Image (cartoon, rainbow, N blue to C red):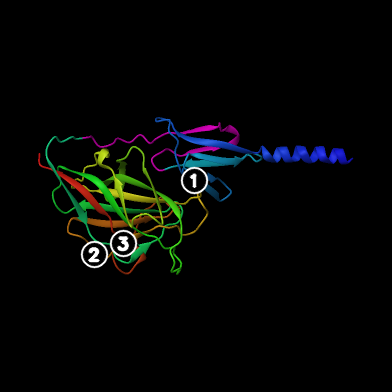
Amino acid sequence: MRLYWYISFFVFLTTKLCVAQNYTIIDSQSKESIPFAAIEILGKNEGFFTNEKGNFFLDTTEIRKIKISCLGYNNLITENKLMKDTIFLIPKLESLSEVIVYSSKKETTTIGGKSKNIAWHLGQHDQLGVLLKPQADYKQSFIEEILIPIGKLPATTESKQKQFESVFRLHLFSNENNQPNIPLLKTPIIIHCNEKSNKLLRVNISNKNIQFTSEGLFVCLEMIGEIDNDGQVIEKKNFVPNFKFTDKQNKYFSSHSYFKPSNSDIWISVNKFLDKEIFLALNLVVSINEN
């Protein structure tokens, strides 16, 4: 009888150890993994992200319908019983702006204003967006760097700075009727930061050939969250860093800031949440070509 119990327990334990299947999300064109894609268990009100290698585990004891999504890719809805170890996401078929190369002298300058003690904390998968339109004529200019001012304290009243390791995504879009339109980056840029990071994050995009035209462009920041040593996103409500705002427009470009919560597809003007107008305090390093 005892031997039978041990055998039954061993079978039960082995079954339990084998129910978690490992999957990897891959870009169908580049064949590269997609870090921090969103996985939603439909009908369960549950969700999580893949890790920084595009991997996730899923319990296969139940038949579940899941939705896999990542900005810039077509959503995929499938059942876990139909999934293979490698899952491909198809990039949205959008046309990037043509690349124009100037073979002339260029002058590099930093444009923008100073941030103030106004901060915005994002929840998981929330986004901040800012529409930037140059005040001057930048017909032959390219954006070399995007400078993002951040704060490092949590949303509570803690006075001591804590340790953290966070990631968020940066997206760039063309502007159409004051809404994000065509992606200007083939893939979004993953940005890591922690308590040792500079309070002004510098994101170099000099090799992306992004022009700063009179139509302007959208810069969007998508919070992924804090991660552990294995690159897994940690469950929290308010993540560090926060993003710095200002209540002053600058003389170089006009800006308007938007917020898109994780449960919505609609961009909402940040000013609807406050009594005064504020602006995400981004700066740009711009190269201006002579010819």
- Point out which mark residue 245 bears: 3
Q: Nearer the viewer, residue 275 or 238?
A: 238
Q: Which residues are magenta?
A: 71-99
Task: Give the prevailing secondary structure in the magenta stretch.
Answer: loop
Query: Circle 2 — which element?
Result: loop
Give the residue type that dot 3 points to. Phe
* Drawn side of residue 149 relative to residue 66, left or right: left
Give the residue type that dot 1 points to. Gly
In the rendered image, residue 75, in percent from the top left (x then y), is placed at: 45, 39
Q: Is residue 72 magenta?
A: yes
Q: Nearer the viewer, residue 98 or 288?
A: 288
Give the residue type that dot 2 points to. Lys
The image quadrant where one finds the C terminus is top left
Disc 1 to disc 3, how far (Cα)? Answer: 29 Å
- Point out which mark residue 248 bears: 2
In the rendered image, residue 82, in percent from the top left (x then y), is placed at: 58, 32
In the rendered image, residue 122, in percent from the top left (x then y), is placed at: 42, 57
Q: Are marks 1 and 2 in contact (CB under 8 Å)?
A: no
Location of residue 290 (image quadrant): top left
The residue labelled by disc 1 is: 231
Residue found 21% across the figure and 42% down from its top:
211
Query: Circle 1 — which element?
Result: loop
Q: Residue furthest right?
A: 1
Count every numbered label the image shows and give the total.
3
Vertical placement of residue 232 versus 117, above or below = above
Location of residue 58 (image quadrant): top right
Q: Earlier in the sequence, mark 1 or mark 3?
A: 1
Residue found 15% across the figure and 36% down from its top:
102
